[in-house]
Amino acid sequence: MQQDFQQGRNDVVEPDGDNVKKPKNEAMEWIKAIVIALVLVILIRWLLFKPFIVDGPSMKPTFHTGERVIVNEILYDIRSPQRGEVIVFHVPSEGRDFIKRVIGVAGDTVKVEGDVVTVNGQPVNETYIQGAIDAAHQNNALYNNKDFPNEEFPDGTVPEGHVFVMGDNRSDSTDSRMIGYVPLDDIVGRADLIFWPVKDISIVNH
């Protein structure tokens, strides 16, 4: 309403119909739009999505050290994590964040025996690492070096409010086989996009 009122007043001031203040008004509207857009970007950046840097080989071949990923922080406020999703979570005992893949959710019975992972008695089709598993087998080796359940964690059923996670690089990953089930409250969010370096830009395969 304020803008309409000013426009009408300007029309009265200029008998020939020219609006000398129009360019200034348009410029102000552009400035407002840019400021609002920047505020929205900052809010989205800090409240909904955050960048993380991958450090370590535990998620090869999906991620590599130095890659930057965008983590969706609001998704798990809407729903629970699902099998196959790559998540970032706090590990208080380590004092840092881990990035791993969800293998089992609450109520699932997980078993890892060699390179065969089963959930509720059904083998998991792990297309995201099948090439690496096949390469290991061609060299008469196993891709995985630690089974589950084990002496440290003999209960293979995921408790309520937790998930079971593993790194894609099974022989070089500290995950639920060693640290136990991950509480939902410790999850930061889901890794959705690799955005750096440019050559690696891609949507994360869940």
Image: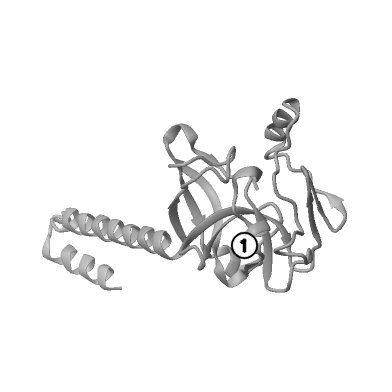
Q: In the image, is 94 to the left or to the right of 122?
A: left
Q: In the image, is 75 to the left or to the right of 9?
A: right
Residue located farthest toward the top when viewing the structure as drawn = 138
Q: Judge by depth and name the residue closer to the eye, 9 or 166.
A: 166
Could you say where residue 90 lies in the image, as x and y percent from the top left? 51, 64
Q: In the image, is 102 to the left or to the right of 64?
A: right
Q: Quadrant of residue 110?
A: bottom right
Residue located farthest toward the front when viewing the structure as drawn = 151
Residue located farthest toward the right when viewing the structure as drawn = 121
Answer above or below: position of 26 versus 47: above
Could you say where residue 14 lies in the image, as x and y percent from the top left? 12, 60
Q: Judge by depth and name the residue closer to the eye, 136 or 53.
A: 136
Quarter holding the N terminus is: bottom left
Q: Which residue is mark 1?
A: 179
Query: Label 1: few (<14), some or many (≥20) within 10 Å?
Result: some
Q: Quadrant of residue 45?
A: bottom left
Q: In the image, is 58 to the left or to the right of 79?
A: left
Q: Judge by depth and name the residue closer to the eye, 132 or 26.
A: 132
* Residue at image location 79% in from the left, 68% down from the top: 107
Could you say where residue 109 lies in the image, as x and y percent from the top left? 81, 62
Answer above or below: position of 67 versus 186: above
Could you say where residue 72 lies in the image, as x and y percent from the top left? 52, 58
- Three-letter residue code for mark 1: Ile
Report the number of discs: 1
Please say which color scheme the image uses. Answer: one colour
Q: Judge by depth and name the residue closer to the eye, 47 or 158.
A: 158
* Residue at image location 50% in from the left, 55% down from the top: 71
Mark 1, secondary structure of its residue = helix
